């Protein structure tokens, strides 16, 4: 099997490539610029390609892959930036549409739990989307465009709605990275909200394994929540991370107000994910 991947230099992408290195597949990884900071690829090659400037031969330049794992997206963590709708959506819409037109049989695309908007509780793939920020709106529009394209072209689509991920290499503004930075700097306290928000966190290594498992399935998987299915308070999550490090940093609860752009309690229902990949 030949697998192409975009976004391989990103947080999740690096872990996906690490997992692909242990699979009996041929990998073609796309980078906008070939440099020295590319993840090691033992069973394939890196090629230089700008997804915003592809040609009518790009699918063939990738070696006619059996499946494309499309993780590329720029502009985060500025979730409200118009860049997502003005630049990212049309760029990725054009890229994927042209790849399918050139013969791509299967595509796996990264979506987001923010497509659900301010809905609370356990979120399932069949629920209506209600995106509230530019990033989520752009992703939801891309999903709709691809589903519309399926009525005109013969290809398989898997749309992955990622919930919160954590682990090595995470961007520095994430909760996980901020905590570990405070620990490394030997700060006595860690400032955070009251911590009563309920969230769904999944180790990025597990998420990467699920991505690869779904890529290996030659099927049309539709929308899939990539999540733990385990609702936990932010406080309990951070306390568990602190315990893992065996440090004595104290949590300064209530230092920051609760954000008004996301619901207090939401998590993913992972029944569909479990039905597709088995034991999590």
Image (cartoon, rainbow, N blue to C red):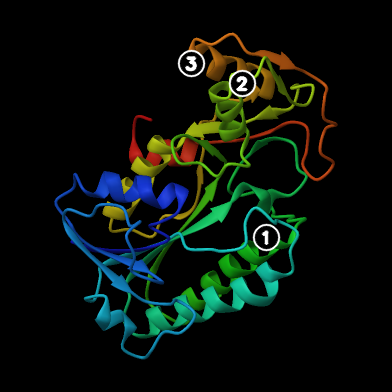
Q: Residue furthest front?
A: 185
Comparing labels 3 and 1, the label whose residue is closer to the camera: 3
Label 3 crowd bin: few (<14), some (14–19), many (20+), radius 10 Å: few
- In the rendered image, which quarter contains the C terminus? top left
* Disc sitting over residue 56 in the figure: none
Spatial CA distance of label 3 from label 2 is 11 Å
Residue 85 located left or right of residue 90: right
Q: Earlier in the sequence, mark 1 or mark 2?
A: 1
Comparing labels 3 and 2, the label whose residue is closer to the camera: 3
Label 2 crowd bin: few (<14), some (14–19), many (20+), radius 10 Å: some
Q: Is 244 located above or below residue 129 in the figure?
A: above
Q: Could you say whether the residue bearing mark 3 is in a helix, strand or loop?
A: helix
Q: Identify the residue position indicated by label 2 in the image.
A: 238
Q: Could you say whether the residue bearing mark 1 is in a helix, strand or loop?
A: helix
Q: Identify the residue position indicated by label 1 in the image.
A: 135
Relative to the observer, which residue lies in front, 213 or 194?
Answer: 194
Which residue sits at x=47%, y=74%? Answer: 150
Q: Is 207 located above or below residue 91 in the figure?
A: above
Q: Identify the residue position indicated by label 3 in the image.
A: 245
Which residue sits at x=52%, y=11%? Answer: 243
- Residue 210 at what x, y percent from top left? 37, 43
Q: Could you say whether the residue bearing mark 2 is in a helix, strand or loop?
A: helix
Q: Earlier in the sequence, mark 3 or mark 2?
A: 2
């Amino acid at each position: 099997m030949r697998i192409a991947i975009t976004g391989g230099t990103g947080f999740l992408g690096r872990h996906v490539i690490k997992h692909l290195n242990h699979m009996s597949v041929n990998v073609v990884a796309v980078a906008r610029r070939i440099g020295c900071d590319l993840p090691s690829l033992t069973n394939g090659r890196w090629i230089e390609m700008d997804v915003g400037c592809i040609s009518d031969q790009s699918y063939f330049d990738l070696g006619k892959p059996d499946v494309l794992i499309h993780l590329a997206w720029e502009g985060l963590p500025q979730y409200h930036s118009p860049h997502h709708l003005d630049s990212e959506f049309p760029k990725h819409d054009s890229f994927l549409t042209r790849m399918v037109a050139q013969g791509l049989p299967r595509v796996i695309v990264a979506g987001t739990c923010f497509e659900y908007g301010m809905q609370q509780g356990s979120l399932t793939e069949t629920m209506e989307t209600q995106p509230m920020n530019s990033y989520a709106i752009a992703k939801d529009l891309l999903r709709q465009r691809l589903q519309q394209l399926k009525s005109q072209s013969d290809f398989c689509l898997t749309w992955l709605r990622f919930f919160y991920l954590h682990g090595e290499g995470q961007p520095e503004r994430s909760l996980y990275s901020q905590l570990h930075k405070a620990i490394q700097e030997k700060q006595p306290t860690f400032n955070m909200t009251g911590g009563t928000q309920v969230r769904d966190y999944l180790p990025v290594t597990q998420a990467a394994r699920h991505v690869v498992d779904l890529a290996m399935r030659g099927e049309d998987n539709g929308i899939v929540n990539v999540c733990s299915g385990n609702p936990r308070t932010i406080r309990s999550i951070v306390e568990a991370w602190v315990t893992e490090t065996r440090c004595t940093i104290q949590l300064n609860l209530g230092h920051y107000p609760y954000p008004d752009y996301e619901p207090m309690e939401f998590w993913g229902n992972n029944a569909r994910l479990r039905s597709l990949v088995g034991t999590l």
